[in-house]
Image (cartoon, grey):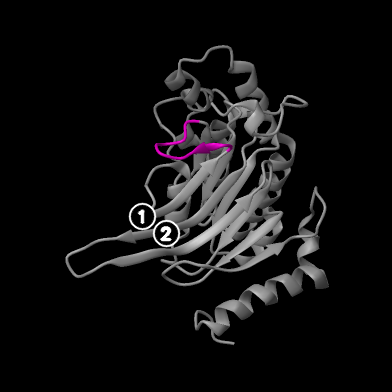
Amino acid sequence: MIAADQSLARSNGRGVSASISLKNVEKVYGGPSGDLHAIAPLSIELPAGEAVSIVGPSGCGKSTLMRLIAGLDAPTRGEIRVGHQVVAKPVPDIGIVFQRDLLLDWRKVLGNVLLPAEIKGLSGLEDRARELLQEFDVGAFADSYPWQLSGGMRQRVAIARALLTRPALLFLDEPFSALDALTRDQMNVLLQRVQTSEGVTTLLITHSITEAIFCADRVLVMSGRPGAIMDDIRVPFERPRRLAIRETAEFTSIGRRIREHFEKVGVLVG
C-alpha cells in the first residue's frame, strides 16, 4: 500500500489516491529486425485524485504507457513514481479494467466483485461490494451470473470489482469500445460520477475524443509511434457533467483542438 503521506489523506470514506510522476521515461523494444521505439522520452506529473484521459492513434503506445506506470513492464530509461515510491515491480494498490470485462462466468456477480479481497486475504468487504453494485445500478443482480447480464452491466460489475479495495489508482484500457453507442454514453456518465465520488486517481485510455474530454479533468494527446505528448489539455467543466455539455461551443473547441493535432501528423485528413 502507498503511505498516506505520499498521497491524499482519507476523507468521506474515500481511499488514498496516489500521484503519478514520469521523468524522461522511454521504452524501446529490441528485435531481430532492429529496435522499436514505442515511447519517446516524456515527463508527466499527475496529481493525486485527478482523472486523466490518454487519446491517440492505434499503436502510439497508450497501453504501453499504462503498463509502465502499473509496473507490468519496465522503462528502458527514465523513472516512474507512484506516490513517492519508484515503480520497480507491479503496483499492488491499483484497479484495472480492460475492454473485456474478464468476469468469471461460474461465479455470481457478488463473488466476482469480492475476488480481489479473496486474493489479498481481506475480509469484511461484502457490504462495500454491495454498495458499489448499488451505486452502479446492478445491485439487484448480485446473485446472478455474469452470463445473464448485458455487456454494459458486465462492465459495471468489472469497475465495481476494480474499486472494491479502494485502490490508489484506477486504470481503464478502452473499457467501453465494444459497447453500443447508447450504452457507452451511459457508462461515460457513470465513470465520471464514480470517479468524483471515489476520488481515485484515474487513467483512461480511449480512441474516442469525445469520451476523453467528457470523462476527464485533463486530456493527454499522444502522437504516433514513438509515442510523445503532443498536447496536455485542462478540461474546464465542473462535475457532475451531463451529456448535453458535449454540444457546447467550449466542448466542441477542445475536440477541434485535438483533431487538429492528428490532422497535422497525418492521422486524420481534414
x then y, percent, for residue 36: 31, 66
**Is residue 268 or residue 134 the one in the foreground?**
268
Q: Amino acid at mark 2?
A: Glu
Q: Does the CB distance between marks 1 and 2 fall below 8 Å? A: yes
Q: Is 14 situated above or below 259?
A: above
Q: Write the residue at 57% across / 41% down.
A: 170
x then y, percent, for residue 237: 81, 57
Asked whether 84 falls inside the magenta stretch, the response is yes
Secondary structure under the numbered disc 2 in the rendered image: strand
- Graded by Cα atoms within 10 Å as few (under 14), some (14 to 19) or many (20 or more), the crowding at tag 1 reads some
Residue 233 vs residue 98: left or right? right
Picture quarter containing residue 202?
A: top right
Q: Amino acid at mark 1?
A: Thr
Q: Is 218 situated above or below 84?
A: below
**Is residue 231 or residue 268 the one in the foreground?**
231
Picture quarter containing residue 181?
A: bottom right
The residue at which mark 1 appears reads as 76
Q: Is residue 183 visible?
A: no
> Which mark, by number, is residue 53?
none
**Is residue 100 or residue 231 the one in the foreground?**
231
Asked whether 225 falls inside the magenta stretch, the response is no
Q: Write the residue at 65% across / 27% down.
A: 4
Q: Write the residue at 57% across / 48% down.
A: 21
Q: Write the residue at 36% across / 55% down.
A: 76
The quadrant of the image that shows the C terminus is bottom right
The quadrant of the image that shows the N terminus is top right
The residue at which mark 2 appears reads as 26
Say whether disc 1 or disc 2 marks the residue closer to the N-terminus. Answer: 2
Main SS of the magenta part reads loop
Write down the region rendered in magenta. 83-92
